[in-house]
Image (spheres, helix red, strand yellow):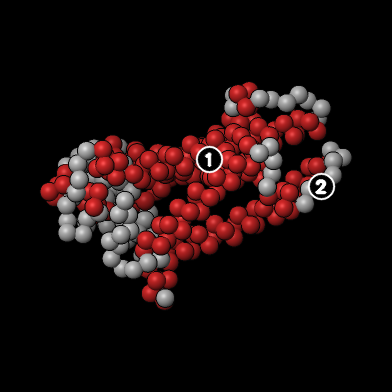
Amino acid sequence: MRRTVRDNGLSLAFVGLFLLTLVAQSFVGQADNNEQLLQHGAAPVGYLEYISSSSFVVDVAENWQSEFLQFFMFILATVWLVQRGSPESKKPGDEGVGTDRDQYIGEYALDDSPAWARVRGAQLWLYSNSLLLVMGAVFLLSWLAQSLAGQISANEEAALHGEPAQTWAQYVVSPDFWNRTLQNWQSEFLAVAAMVTFSIYLRQRGSSESKPVGTPHHTTSVEAE
Amino acid sequence: MGVGSKAGPRGIGVMFWVVLSVVVVGLAVMIALPLAGR
């Protein structure tokens, strides 16, 4: 048991933080939502009603989609683009999907390689791109959830102001939808650019996200290994 | 699919399924609630 917890410390810590912050968001979100309702002379909503409302869902989904887009873009971009000196990058010259030997595919598979790395055809293609495909699917589905919940939430707010409701097709080209979307995307892209470039020159001793402290700036962690 | 089937140290595969379940259930709820008009 102790060993299982230690072996999974990173994922357990972040799943725990996710649940704690989601619950915290639900309480402060309800308080914020009720403040706005009271300002418009409408009745406040209870906790269970709030967490099953589109107002809560749209706030959760808009952040989900941007985080999964961030990882989708980072995984895709690091196949073809490099940043010399960054531990987040392959070394210059290694751009591309790599050889079968590099990737331990087919006859180059190791004794304990995943079963789908030994086969050829569609199954191998699917497994070779499975991380990108799953991240991309979660991005698209959470963006869809944002659009569906955002439409209902925007229409509820419009009703408070006596304005007409929007259809889903109208909502997905509206300023509200794109403001919610782009305000999250810009921060994710800046964070990736910061991580890629700051990690060339800056270090965190002991972190797998950093080069070892004494590694030269021009050396990527891949080269150093 | 074989993911985690040869995980070596025991228990690695469990977290894959825990996190995947959280993501799938979260997506299903977030799509179903607005479709139900909530």
Which chain contains the residue that carries disc 1? Answer: A
For the image shown, how many numbered marks are present on the structure?
2
Side of A65 relative to A201 (left or right): right
At which x and y percent is residue A154?
A: 70, 33
Q: Residue furthest bottom?
A: A2
Query: Is any atom of residue B13 visible in this view?
Result: yes
Looking at the picture, which amino acid does disc 1 mark?
A: Ser
Against A199, is A96 above or below?
above
Q: Residue at x 16, y 44 (%)?
A: A100
Which is more toward the observer, A75 or B23? B23
Side of A159 relative to A174 (left or right): right
The answer to which image quadrant residue A148 occupies is: top right
The answer to which image quadrant residue A132 occupies is: top left
Q: Which secondary structure lies at badge 2?
A: loop
Looking at the picture, which amino acid does disc 2 mark?
A: Pro
At which x and y percent is residue A20?
A: 59, 60
Side of A99 relative to A192 (left or right): left
Which is more toward the observer, B21 or A5? B21
At which x and y percent is residue A185?
A: 51, 37
Q: Which secondary structure lies at badge 1?
A: helix
Q: Which mark is residue A35?
A: none
The residue tagged 2 is A44
Query: Is any atom of residue A84 visible in this view?
Result: no
The residue tagged 1 is A142
At which x and y percent is residue A117?
A: 22, 48
Q: Residue furthest left?
A: A107
Which chain contains the residue that carries disc 2? Answer: A
Badge 1: residue crowd in 10 Å (few <14, some 14–19, many ≥20)? many
Q: Residue at x 17, y 52 (%)?
A: A109
**What is the spatial separation of the Cα atoms under label 2 and label 1, in whole angstroms?**
27 Å
Side of A196 relative to A102 (left or right): right
Q: Residue at x 72, y 31 (%)?
A: A155
